[in-house]
Amino acid sequence: MSKIKIADLPSVHLLDKNRLPNCAAIYFVTDSNGQIIYIGRTVNLVARWKDHHRFNQLKRFNRKNLLSISWLNCSNDVSTLSKLENEFINLYKPPLNWTKVVTPIRKITPVETALQQSLQQLAKLNTVIFGFDPIAGEIPTIYLNYPVYGRRGLSGSIRVALRNINKKASSLKWKEYHTEPKSFGKFGFWETEYNGIRIDLSPGQGLVDIMQDSTRRTIAGVTFMALSVLQLETIIESVPEIKKDTPGLEAVEEDPIPMKFIGKLPASNGNNKSVVEVEPWEELEPMPEGEVREMNRQFLDVDGAEVEVCTNENGKHFVRHNVYWWIMHKSKNPDPELDCITEKLQQLIDRLPSMRWSGYKFRLETIVFGEDNVEVESILLPLAMFEDVMKNAKSGWGVKLFQEITSGEYKSKPEDGASVKLCAWLQHNSLSSLLQTNKV
């Protein structure tokens, strides 16, 4: 079915509904901008609108935005009318047809606004533009991936965000067309459609390993991380099924939905849980060969546990892996190769309940502390990563002790080790609150 020109159909203003004719019709309620907000069917148009179940709801909208009723004359065959109504609803997706009559609706959200708001939230959740297939099946498709790692990911946050978008009175609706079993992470697969283009959102295993090297592109004016041409070609070569299933897949260069950026998401008042921001990695750029990284350091005392915090010239804070090993194992200078430092650090963050640090690349480098001209070799852990690791440290403690710490019932004892005291303190505090903020 092709779209019709609503402006060419006969119409009356909402409050002039008594002037409607006595005929079988498909009727369209439109606002002053020509947006179709409701579609219905009837064998007697004027009789249907004498006591329409949505009239009071529509009358409230009419106070600020004049509404009109347009109609298309049809056969009075009920099955024909019903079929036409469903086809027009699927074609135009009028927002009020997706809401209950009793639902209080303050405003109708334009489809462009709902699209950009949902895409903004996906971008905040580190979603990546995988590619665009202009010949995918019957409809051009944009493929988006959100990062997952094993059975962990942000599927729950995405589900909350998109369901909140779906609650808006808008023509744009996201459909969760597949959900993986809980044993596989319960990851959701979503789709929506705008102006003849489908947007497909699915989980992406291994995505965390390439996010840092991704480029930036826009969808409907919203900026995302995106796979470069080279990255996509490399993936397609290693996974031939992708080329078979989506033969026209290409990296996004130009915005497939060119649209002026409408504005930012509404500011949160503290109760809006639909927007979940994920902080980016605090990974440092590798130093050129032969050069060293100059940093300052300060020593923090947390209930008798000493933590050395390093700060670079941009004011970012890190903890050396040597410090972690001393706190946890009383090993002052672990050997990077013999003690498998990199592999063990990777295992540590992989066991964290959050996937924030999944895919972080650890590397050994030379560090010079400018104030005392001390040179060391170490692996740097972002301060927030160190806190996450320590808050979840429970090696050899026993279940009871860890439960006391996480429940707030723990009482510090002189014989307790630094790892126990630091873990307990970090449940309700942050090391950043103790830092002096002078830059290098």
Image: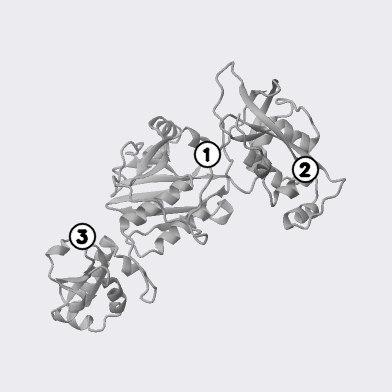
Q: Residue at x 58, y 32 (%)?
A: 361
Please state which of residues 270 and 1 is positioned toward the viewer in this rendering.
270
Q: CA distance from mark 2 to mark 3?
A: 67 Å
Residue 208 numbered mark, or none: 1
Q: Position of residue 307 (x, y in %)?
A: 73, 37
- At mark 2, the secondary structure is helix
Q: Position of residue 20 (x, y in %)?
A: 15, 78
Q: Residue at x 26, y 61 (%)?
A: 92
Mark 2 and mark 3 lie on one chain; the one further toward the N terminus is 3
Q: Residue furthest right?
A: 415
Q: Residue at x 20, y 83 (%)?
A: 47
C-beta proximity under 8 Å, tags 2 and 3: no
Q: Amino acid at mark 1?
A: Val
Query: Can residue 393 be seen from the camera position used here?
Result: yes
Q: Position of residue 145 (x, y in %)?
A: 45, 45
Q: CA distance from mark 2 to mark 1?
A: 29 Å
Q: Mark 2 = which residue?
A: 419
Q: Nearer the viewer, mark 2 or mark 1?
A: 2
Give the tally of numbered discs.
3
Q: Mark 3 = which residue?
A: 1
